[in-house]
Image (cartoon, rainbow, N blue to C red):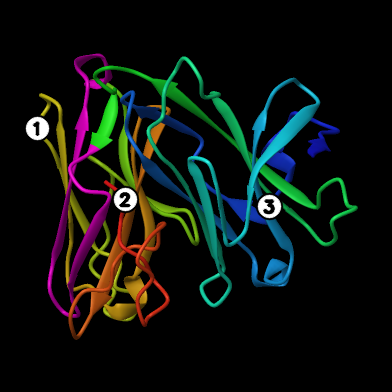
Amino acid sequence: MHFTILSSDTECYEGLKTVAKLTVKPGESITIPCMYHLTFKYYKKYWCYRSTLYYCNIMGTANSTKGKVTVTDYPENNFFTVTMRNLQPSTDYTHFWCAMSLTESSLYDDMRELSINYQSDPDLSVQRSEVSGEAGGNVSVLCRYSPRYRGEKKRWCRLRDQKCSAVGGFRSPADPNKGWDPQMRDDGFGTLSVEMVGVKQTDSGWYWCEVGDLQRPVYLSVTHEAAISVPTTSNRNSHGYTNDVK
């Protein structure tokens, strides 16, 4: 089964949000979030690879596992995740789509493309793809980038509203009602440090590190109790979340 793609320009589609370009190490597993507007809560969710300019072949559907791909929908949080395991440049594709349709006969209702490049030493990675902390505390994230990205712009972004904070950019005083107060430091030698200050439970969700044209997703869990694991592919717990795949 495949979708026919009427246009390769994805900027016109606003219903879905995801990262645009990733670098991964061969053999690595990665979880990718696809966030959608609540209007699409009951639409069918897909993950597909773009085999040609006009066709996208389905690799997985919501709440199922097929081969190395698991797709899990979280309608209560308005996103679905795609986990791809043991990625290999010799057998896996490089261009993919988050996609949704109202019915199985629909070609598509919304799609968003992203690309994956395979590198033995990725140009952008994160120390941990899942971070957690207690409400009122601080949460730290470390992003690693290659020497050729030293001079590129670096940002920390929140997926649900695509709000970003840049290194060296203007940072307004913390808003106690919004909980968005990321403090960032670039050491200039390959490490971008991000600290979320005074986090709230409502800050839980997907974020990404961005260096130049590359992004890397990170799931933040904020709780008053024991940390809730990032939604990925296995061991779904009582909260409806699952443990990260390493």
Give the residue displayed 49% in from the left and 61% down from the top.
Answer: 160
Give the residue displayed 30% in from the left and 56% down from the top.
Answer: 244
The dot on residue 60 is none
The residue that mark 2 highlights is 245
Q: Is residue 90 left or right of residue 144?
A: right
Label 3: which secondary element: loop
- In front of the other: 12 or 165: 12
Q: CA distance from mark 1 to mark 2?
A: 29 Å
Residue 123 quadrant? top left
Which quarter of the rendering shows the N terminus? Answer: top right
Q: CA distance from mark 2 to mark 3?
A: 29 Å
Q: What's the magenta region?
A: 126-150
Residue 239 quadrant? bottom left
Give the residue displayed 81% in from the left and 48% down from the top.
Answer: 108
Residue reaching furthest bottom? Answer: 224
Q: Nearer the viewer, mark 1 or mark 2?
A: 2
* Residue 191 image position (x, y, % from top left): 14, 33
